[in-house]
Image (spheres, rainbow, N blue to C red):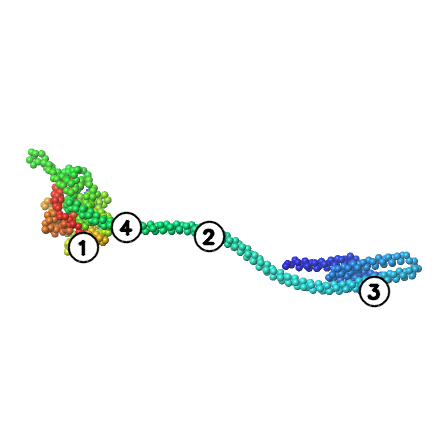
């Protein structure tokens, strides 16, 4: 409900009242033209009828109209009011015309004397007026009735108005309540729009989710397909795996069998290889000629290109008698191998690498460098720093480490211990000693119950790489040079012995091996005239001479299978006895200096070496258990 219908009902009410008023307007207007005149007349009409006719004739006109107008303003019924006013107006009109006609006609047409006529006229007029008054009274009565009616109607209307007012206030309250409702509605509608937005958002999300779900479903399908493919592949692979496993099993058997065969082959190889080595002789001698310092060739040493086992020292002597020409004297020597001055370190090592291999197979191996000072012993054994010039010791060690690594694949495990000793004037000196010089210990050679030789207080280093060995060589050189400054050219007057103890275990086959690789740089073999050396030098020389000659004696005693081998005669042979004995392989390098003034020393060296070369020490046997 709204305010509008209420207002219009009010207006309808008001306008109906006004309409009624307008119906009265012509009379009202006319009467208002002369208000003072009308008012007293109207009062007289209400009071009574005994008034002069003129005054009375006017009274009915104004009184009912005025009161009517006033009554009409509050009259509830339009119809009633209208008919009463209309009838009043009609009566007034007819009364006027009648009055005018009767009065005017009689006044003008009756002669003055006709009093009777005039009286009758007057009587007519009177009766006319009386009837008019009567009718006006009637009218008045009816108007009174209608006024009463109107008043009751007004009362009714007022009560109705009151009820409508109360209704309006009710409506207003209702409206108030409704405006609250409207606010609520507005809130609800805004909530609704928010919810709608949210809903549309959710719808969008839902659509996205749906798309996602669809795509995931597709993916799932794909994955399912893939899974089934994989499953079938897996089944196939499992079958293949079974087959492969069986194959692996049979291959493992084959491998085990082949390993056994390999081991047998390896054992056979060692046996055959050592048979060859035995056939070559357990003592071998290699001759190496050092190049001249300026690189030229020396005439007195002759080497044949076609034969790498012989060397000739040629000497031209002037004839004592002078009758004959110069005497040419040739000294021919043959060895297992003769290396020319051009032979590289690598070539030299290749010749002894098989011997080094024997050390890993459980044979003791001993390698000496014999020769006068400056003939190239140290160069042959140790060499220089660079790869190409490295000598026998680093190369032998490298080879042993590499071979050991290969043998590890067949179940072998090796341990290597290195030591470096100097024998000077029949005393031992630890070349790997790194402590204070003042605290340098003394050493003794000890022989255990099982004939193993060891040196007391000596440094025994565990080694497993070539670099470690090169480090040890550097320490040894450092120790030597310290001694060198104190004593001129000492290193050439001492033997230096590098020893590598090898211990191998093949746990799987319950095999062990133990051997020693000895690489010895001997003291200079040169001899001095006894007159030239005295005191300390004489002592040195005697020591060197005796140890070198004792080495020769020991070797030949071994070769002759003598019952007594004089190992104890020198520290060198005593230290090396296990390496020189029956189960060892010995190699001697005889180094030759090419200078003509070294001729005699070269001849001596070659002679000594030849003696050694002629020795055949009994067949070696590996130290295997
Ligand atoms: P030794 O140890 O017998 O006294 P060295 O090994 O010290 O003799 O050699 C003396 C010199 O000759 C050193 O300078 C060395 O480098 C050099 N020399 C020795 N042999 C060779 C060779 N085969 N090739 C080149 N130089 C050599
Ligand atoms: Mg030397």
* Ligand 1 quarter of the rendering: top left
Q: CA distance from mark 2 to mark 4?
A: 53 Å
Which residue bears the numbered disc 2?
213
Quarter where residue 44 is shown: bottom right
Q: Are marks 1 and 3 in contact (CB under 8 Å)?
A: no
Residue 39: which numbered mark, if any? none
**Few, some or many residues within 10 Å of mark 4 (<14, 14–19, 20+):** few
Q: Earlier in the sequence, mark 4 or mark 1?
A: 4
Please provide percent x and percent y for residue 128. Answer: 85, 61
Please provide percent x and percent y for residue 65. Answer: 78, 60
The one of 363 and 397 positioned closer to us in this rendering: 363
Q: Quadrant of the N terminus?
A: bottom right
**Few, some or many residues within 10 Å of mark 1 (<14, 14–19, 20+):** some
Please provide percent x and percent y for residue 61. Answer: 81, 60
Q: CA distance from mark 3 to mark 2?
A: 109 Å
Q: CA distance from mark 2 to mark 1?
A: 84 Å
Which residue bears the numbered disc 3?
49
Q: Earlier in the sequence, mark 3 or mark 2?
A: 3
Left-right relation of 226 to 54: left
* SS class, disc 1: loop
Q: CA distance from mark 1 to mark 3?
A: 181 Å
Residue 457: which numbered mark, if any? 1
Query: What's the residue at 70%, 59% (across, down)?
Result: 13
Using the image, determine if residue 440 lies above or below residue 341: below
Which residue bears the numbered disc 4?
250
Q: Earlier in the sequence, mark 2 or mark 4?
A: 2
* SS class, disc 3: loop
* SS class, disc 4: helix
Query: What's the residue at 66%, 59% (across, down)?
Result: 6
């Amino acid at each position: 409900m709204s305010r509008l219908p209420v207002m219009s009902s009010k207006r309808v009410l008001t306008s109906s009242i006004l309409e009624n008023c307008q119906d009265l307007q012509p009379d009202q207007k006319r009467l208002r033209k002369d208000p003072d005149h009308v008012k007293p007349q109207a009062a007289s009409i209400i009071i009574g009828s005994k008034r002069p006719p003129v005054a009375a004739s006017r009274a009915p006109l104004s009184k009912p109209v005025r009161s009517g107008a006033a009554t009409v303003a509050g009259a509830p019924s339009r119809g009633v009011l209208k008919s009463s006013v209309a009838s009043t107006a009609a009566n007034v009109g007819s009364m006027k015309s009648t009055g005018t006609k009767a009065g005017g006609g009689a006044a003008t047409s009756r002669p003055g004397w006709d009093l009777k006529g005039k009286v009758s006229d007057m009587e007519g007029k009177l009766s006319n007026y009386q009837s008019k008054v009567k009718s006006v009274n009637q009218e008045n009565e009816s108007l009174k009735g209608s006024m009463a009616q109107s008043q009751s109607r007004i009362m009714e209307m007022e009560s109705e108005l009151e009820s409508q007012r109360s209704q309006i206030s009710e409506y207003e309250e209702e409206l108030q309540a409704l405006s609250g409702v409207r606010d609520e509605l507005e809130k609800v509608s805004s909530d609704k729009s928010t919810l709608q937005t949210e809903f549309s958002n959710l719808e969008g999300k839902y659509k996205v989710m749906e798309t996602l779900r669809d795509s995931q479903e597709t993916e799932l399908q794909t994955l399912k397909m893939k899974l089934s493919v994989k499953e079938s592949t897996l089944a196939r692979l499992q079958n293949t795996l079974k087959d492969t496993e069986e194959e692996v099993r049979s291959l493992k058997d084959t491998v085990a069998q082949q390993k056994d065969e390999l081991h047998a082959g390896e054992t056979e190889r060692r046996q055959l290889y050592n048979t060859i080595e035995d056939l070559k002789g357990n003592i071998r001698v290699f001759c190496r000629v050092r190049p001249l310092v300026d690189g030229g060739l020396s005439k007195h040493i002759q080497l044949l290109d076609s034969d790498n086992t012989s060397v000739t020292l040629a000497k031209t002597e002037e004839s004592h008698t002078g009758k004959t020409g110069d005497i040419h004297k040739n000294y021919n020597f043959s060895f297992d191998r003769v290396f020319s001055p051009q032979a590289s370190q690598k070539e030299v090592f290749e010749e002894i690498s098989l011997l080094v291999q024997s050390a890993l197979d459980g044979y003791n191996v001993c390698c000496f460098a014999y020769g006068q000072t400056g003939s190239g012993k140290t160069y042959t054994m140790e060499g220089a720093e660079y790869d190409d010039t490295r000598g026998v010791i680093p190369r032998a060690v490298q080879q042993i480490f590499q071979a050991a690594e290969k043998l590890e694949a067949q179940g072998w495990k090796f341990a290597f211990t290195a030591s470096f000793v100097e024998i000077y004037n029949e005393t031992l000196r630890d070349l790997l000693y790194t402590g204070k010089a003042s605290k340098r210990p003394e050493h003794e050679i000890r022989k255990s119950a099982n004939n193993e030789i060891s040196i007391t207080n000596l440094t025994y280093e565990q080694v497993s790489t070539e670099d470690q060995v090169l480090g040890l060589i550097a320490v040894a050189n450092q120790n030597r040079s310290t001694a060198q400054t104190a004593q001129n050219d000492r290193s050439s007057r001492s033997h230096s012995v590098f020893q590598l103890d090898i211990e191998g275990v093949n746990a799987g086959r319950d095999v062990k091996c133990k051997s020693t690789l000895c690489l010895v740089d001997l003291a200079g073999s040169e001899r001095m005239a006894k007159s030239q050396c005295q005191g300390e030098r004489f002592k040195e020389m005697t020591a060197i001479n005796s140890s070198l000659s004792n080495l020769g004696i020991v070797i030949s005693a071994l070769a002759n299978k003598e019952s007594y081998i004089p190992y104890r005669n020198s520290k060198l042979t005593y230290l090396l006895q296990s390496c020189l004995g029956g189960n060892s392989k010995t190699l001697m390098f005889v180094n030759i200096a090419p200078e003509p003034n070294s001729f005699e020393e070269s001849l001596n060296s070659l002679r000594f070496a030849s003696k050694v070369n002629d020795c055949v020490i009994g067949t070696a046997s590996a130290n295997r258990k």
